[in-house]
Amino acid sequence: MAEASSWQNGAAFAAQCAVLGLRTVRTVDELNAAYRPLILQWHPDRHHGQATHAVAVARATAINTAYAYLLAALERDDGHAPAEPAMAPRPARPVSRDGFPDPSVLEIFVKPSNIISVGYNSTTADLFVKYLGHRIYRYRGVPPTVVEALLRAPSASIFVSEHVDRHYESEMHRA
């Protein structure tokens, strides 16, 4: 992906880059470097009970939409624009529809990894981890500091294996 494909100069691509504070993006590593600090800053749990909560929900949703759009574009970098109707930004919604058993949990992508995404409910201290194959594990009683360390870890899979599995009660769900 040394050179930008022609569709990467399009308005939709530029708009999604702008959501993440980027002019352009050429690698998944660049995308992740922009995504992670923003989703940490705007995650609704960090704004719970504050006047900024509704703004955080909308902003986090836009950040996730931009990430998904740009990731699909980078993974599909064959010179054709991604199908816009399938990846067009969706309106902000307070409830995620990404398969977590707790609908109030916002999905945070952690690719590349065998973990697709994580979610956290700060009220119940439940951490959700969605693996490839759509297995979802719910870990109970996980402190927010562990979740923040997970989101900053270079490898989500290694972090979960070393610091979450066998340390917290868990149960498996199917998405």
Image: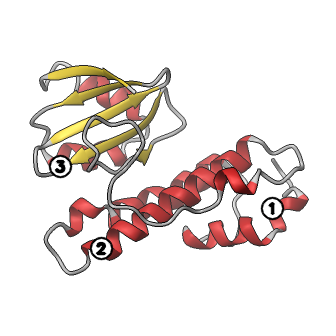
**Where does residue 113 sit, x and y in percent of width and height?**
50, 31
Pick the residue in front: 138 or 88: 88
Which residue shows up at 54% across the image and 57% down it?
65
Query: How dense is the environment of label 2, judged by Cα within 10 Å: few (below 14), some, or many (20 and up)?
Result: some
Residue 157 occupies quadrant: top left
Task: Give the colour scheme shown.
Answer: secondary structure
Q: Do the residues labelled 2 and 1 touch (CB within 8 Å)?
A: no
Q: How far apart are marks 2 and 1 (CA)?
A: 31 Å
Pick the residue in front: 64 or 40: 64
Helix, strand or loop under label 1: helix
Q: How far apart are marks 3 and 2 (CA)?
A: 23 Å
Which residue shows up at 45% across the image and 42% down it?
110
Q: Which amino acid does label 2 sit on?
A: Ala
Question: Which numbered circle lies on residue 145?
Answer: 3
Dot 2 or dot 1, earlier in sequence: 1
Dot 3 or dot 1, earlier in sequence: 1
Helix, strand or loop under label 2: helix
In the rendered view, tell whether residue 101 sits above or below residue 6.
above
Q: Mark 1 points at which residue?
A: 8
Q: Which of marks 2 and 1 is in front?
A: 2
Q: Distance between the residues labelled 3 and 1?
A: 37 Å
**Where does residue 135 sit, x and y in percent of width and height?**
39, 22
**Where does residue 5 sit, x and y in percent of width and height?**
87, 56
168 displayed left or right of 3: left
Q: Name the residue under label 2.
A: 54
Q: Which amino acid does label 1 sit on?
A: Gln
Q: Which of marks 3 and 1 is in front?
A: 1
Which residue shows up at 77% across the image and 51% down it?
82
Q: Are marks 3 and 2 in contact (CB under 8 Å)?
A: no
Q: Nearer the viewer, mark 3 or mark 2?
A: 2
